[in-house]
Amino acid sequence: MNIIPLEQQIAMGKAYLNKRCLQVGHLLPLNERLFNEYFPPGISFLIFRGKEPEALFSYRPGAQAERPSAWFRAVADGKRGWKDALKKVEETAIAQERIIVGTTVFGYDRKKLQALTAPGYVIGARLPESVSLRGKRYDLCILYKDLTDRYDFSVKRSYAKPGLYPSVDVQKAKSPKLKVRGYRPEDQLKLEKFAIHPNVIRRVGLLFAGLSPWPAGSGPPYQEMVNSGRSYPLVCEDETTGEPIGVLWLFASSQDVMQHVMELGMGVKPEYQGIGVGTMLMENMKTLAKRLHLTRVNLTVFEDNVPAQHLYRKTGFVECGKIPGWLQERYVSETYMTLKLK
């Protein structure tokens, strides 16, 4: 077995992937942008036995040091190709002291499911009917493997109880007049300010406001997401101040087989939490989703985030499974939820 960085054989890597593009959810060959999105230089590798590749994989340990998990994407041929790819992924994860490795598999790809479950990968969550191929609907499967027993030393984990993390005290907004509207470019900076507040940033899996996956002092790049053509944000505004105080966005998958579903993210300014902003955004989201001809909306939420889970269930979302492995003060699991649109 020989493993080389993808950038040393980029043409061969593209040719190998495009003959197996259904494994990453595409019917047509991938363009340059999508290829680099799935298999970025620096974290992607080809595995050879002889002169021909038998597997291609990318490995993402995550930008956050407090996240003890890693995710990978892989395309392979046969049992040997999968065995070699998984071996390299798991060896890398252990060297970095990651204890959970995960990936996603489209329900129609039974050979890939078998190749992963045989060596101990578990289906932690199934998002029903999130994949469409040849007139049939399939589940999107999120798989993970716990590597705890691969360490010579003891790996202790204590999981958080619901409601463990208290919110920072803030002065609640007085007499707000709320309305939901579309996103405007001038909203970007105002939304960034509350996106990095401790009451908000904890809910995206970060320890402190200073630890952020975004550039220093900024929040999510909403405008960049809109410009990509794959994000559809809704904004809740307090008309008494003219300020955006909540945002919800639907984010489209790039995969050909998942154009009928989108993922949801949401944030509310701390001063306005608990007064119905989330409910207003959710009800308007349903209208937007139907206009986009979606059949489902999926999301993830931390298991300890009781208020958010209550809102999602009230909106009609149902739980589809859990994936362990985030660390804040204690470990928390991510709960996967889905909303079927009528």
Image (cartoon, helix red, strand yellow):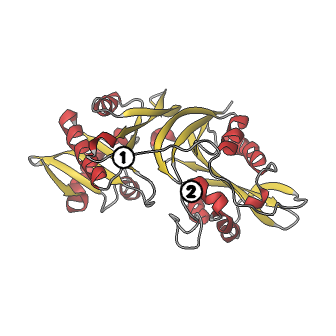
Q: Earlier in the sequence, mark 2 or mark 1?
A: 1
Q: Which mark is residue 229?
A: 2
Q: Residue at x 79, y 66 (%)?
A: 243
Quadrant where the C terminus is found in the figure: top right
Q: Which mark is residue 139?
A: none
Toward which corner of the image does residue 19 lie, by quadrant? top left
Tell me how far mark 2 sits from mark 1, CA to CA: 43 Å
Toward which corner of the image does residue 338 lie, by quadrant? top right
Viewer-proximal residue among 174 and 56: 174
Q: Residue at x 12, y 47 (%)?
A: 1
Q: Residue at x 34, y 42 (%)?
A: 148
- Please rate how many residues cluster around mark 2, counting C-alpha atoms within 10 Å: few if below 14, some from 14 to 19, many from 20: few
* Total numbered badges shown on the rendered structure: 2
Amino acid type assigned to the residue bearing label 2 in the image: Gly
- Please rate how many residues cluster around mark 1, counting C-alpha atoms within 10 Å: few if below 14, some from 14 to 19, many from 20: few
Q: Which mark is residue 155?
A: 1
Q: Is residue 199 left or right of residue 260?
A: right
The percent coordinates of residue 29 (x first, y second) are 35, 47
Toward which corner of the image does residue 318 lie, by quadrant? top right
**Residue furthest bottom in the image:** 217
The percent coordinates of residue 34 (x first, y second) are 40, 54
Amino acid type assigned to the residue bearing label 1 in the image: Val
Q: Residue at x 51, y 49 (%)?
A: 330
Residue 304 sits above or below residue 32 on the image: above
Viewer-proximal residue among 181 and 229: 181
Mark 2 vs mark 1: in front: 1
The answer to whether residue 35 shows anywhere in this view is yes
Residue 313 sits above or below residue 44 on the image: above
